[in-house]
Amino acid sequence: MTPAPRHLLDVDEWSADDVEFVLSDAARHAGNLHADTLRGYRVALLFAEPSTRTRLSFEIAARSLAAETFVIEPSSSSMVKGETLVDTVRNLDALGFDMLVLRHHRAGTPWVAARYFGGAVINAGDGWHAHPTQALLDLLTLRQAFGGADQLRGRKVVIVGDLLHSRVAKSNIWTLTQAGADLCLCGPKPWLRGLEASPVTLTSDLGAALRDADVVMGLRVQRERMAGSALSLGEYVERYQVNSVRLQLAKPGAFFMHPGPINEGIEVTREVARGPRSLVLQQVRNGVAVRISVFAALQPPEPRLGGEPTQTSSATRDFWSAIR
Ligand code: CP
């Protein structure tokens, strides 16, 4: 029997069994779960970068499992007085938190935090690097859309936009290729830099990318990254915006996805983003389900400050025993 994972830093550090547990468990309860699994556990949510979907869904998920949640706003914490991230994490550890959900603008910070934190660290997005729970919820959404875990094999999935700066794309490259999808990354050449070694197709030709696609995933154009870029925002819209005319190149009924936040009218038109083939809000809904199951997968054996023993984690434990 392999031990349960200690942290979720990125999806490529988890075994296929760990990923399968989360996806199957999330599909089963679909986010409609109120259990005592984490009663007595304390979860710190440290978001050093803005977030709507990820932060709220982690908080809903933790509370659904009866955990006590504590949101740390960097702007009102001692970080503004110069306390380092390491010192902040050491203090959260001393305060006895069981789990730390961390979003940070610097790539690699969750790995650093994991060295100084005695409980479980969950990466909620680090710099341009990784966003593991987004990749898991995207995979669940695609399984649901195509009707099964094995239905992604050979499907053409196109990710369009600012791949260079996208942590979502980096984690999705791993999960989607593991799932057997035929992955195509499309964007202006400078935004494909560093991805040459990936086992995927790279192209700057959106028409070629969209041809026969089963899924098109847009990425936010990070306007702040356009400064100094050879491409203006207007040129980007002209060449890369996903609109209903361009979507006709894809397979009939192709799905549109986007991790959010969306700039409607920039990387995608409102018509597509809110249209009948859009999975965007299903992705958001699945965020709660997946994060509930991630907490269940990482649950330490006992609360660090000796809270009540857990009541309802037996279903989770039975599942683990069955698959290991
Ligand atoms: N998808 C995503 O990470 O959205 P937020 O930045 O709102 O959390």
Image: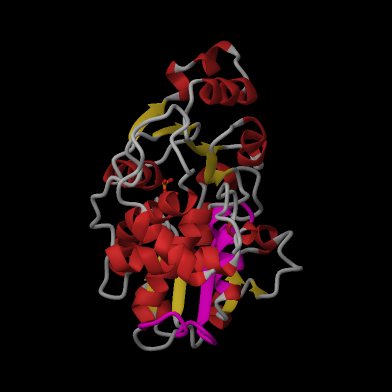
Which percent across, then down, holds residue 259? 43, 57
> Is 152 left, or right, of 6 in this rendering?
left
Please tell me whether residue 67 is drawn above or below residue 212 in the rendered image. above
In the image, is residue 90 part of the stretch drawn in magenta? no
Q: Is residue 258 visible?
A: no
In the image, is residue 152 part of the stretch drawn in magenta? yes
Task: Give the number of callouts.
Answer: 0
Q: How is the image coloured?
A: secondary structure
Front residue of 125 and 27: 27
Q: Is residue 294 visible?
A: yes
Q: Quadrant of residue 65?
A: top left
Image quadrant containing the C terminus: bottom right
Front residue of 259 and 285: 285
* Residue projecting furthest to the top: 81
Write the residue at 61% across / 61% down.
2
Write the residue at 54% across / 87% down.
154
> Is 15 left, or right, of 20 in this rendering?
right
Image quadrant containing the N terminus: bottom right
The boundaries of the magenta stretch are 147-176
Which percent across, then down, holds residue 99? 48, 37
Front residue of 267 and 152: 152
Write the residue at 60% across / 70% down.
185
Which percent across, then down, holds residue 199? 70, 74
Please tell me whether residue 73 is drawn above or below residue 196 in the rendered image. above
Q: Quadrant of residue 265?
A: bottom left
Write the residue at 51% across / 14% down.
78
Which percent across, then down, holds residue 312? 30, 51
